[in-house]
Image: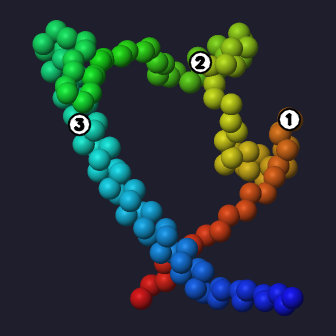
Amino acid sequence: MSVTKERPKALGGEIDRLWALREKKRAAESVVNDIEGEINTLEAALIIRLDGEGLDKASGQRGTVSIGESINGTIEDWDLFTKFVARTKNFQLLHRRVTDTAYRELLSMGRPVPGLKPFTKRKLNLRTIAE
């Protein structure tokens, strides 16, 4: 029984395939962004129309819309807000993630941060060759 090894693909060819896939993705994202813009414009217009007609719900033949509301916070004074969070220990008001740039800056100054462990994230950078 003979086993034939598959010949590895040329590195340059694989890089060009990656580039082509990225460009295809960019084109698709552009289409999606255009559609999202149309959706946002139409949603805003429908909210205005529903409000104007005194409705909070309406239907077409394929879909139904209703206006939902939720209360969200906008920080007006970071100092007051962070003092409140620290004093009351209401840390659930914050997202649980580290700001990588601030963390790297502290590390570069020789100041380790208790509770955090550095790790090296690797990624491939792809650039277009100027023609």
Residue 79 in view here:
yes
38 shown above or below 51: below
Q: CA distance from mark 2 to mark 1?
A: 23 Å
11 shown above or below 120: below
| Mark 3 surroundings within 10 Å by alpha-carbon count, few (fewer than 14), some (14 through 19), many (20 or more) | few
Relative to residue 111, is residue 81 drawn left or right?
A: left
Residue to which mark 3 is pinned = 41
Report the residue at 29% width, 51% height from top. Answer: 34
Specify the label residue 61 is tagged with.
none
Relative to residue 112, is residue 50 drawn left or right?
A: left
Residue 87 coordinates in the image, percent (x, y): 72, 12
Residue 76 in view here:
no
Specify the label residue 115 is tagged with.
1
Frontmost of labels 2 and 1 is 1
| Near-viewer residue (111 or 7) | 7
13 shown above or below 21: below
Which quadrant of the rendered structure holds the N terminus?
Answer: bottom right
Mark closer to the chain start, 3 or 2: 3
The quadrant holding residue 49 is top left
Amino acid type at image mark 1:
Gly
Mark closer to the chain start, 3 or 1: 3
| Near-viewer residue (84 or 33) | 33
Report the residue at 62% width, 19% height from top. Answer: 93
Q: CA distance from mark 3 to mark 1?
A: 45 Å
Residue to which mark 2 is pinned = 81
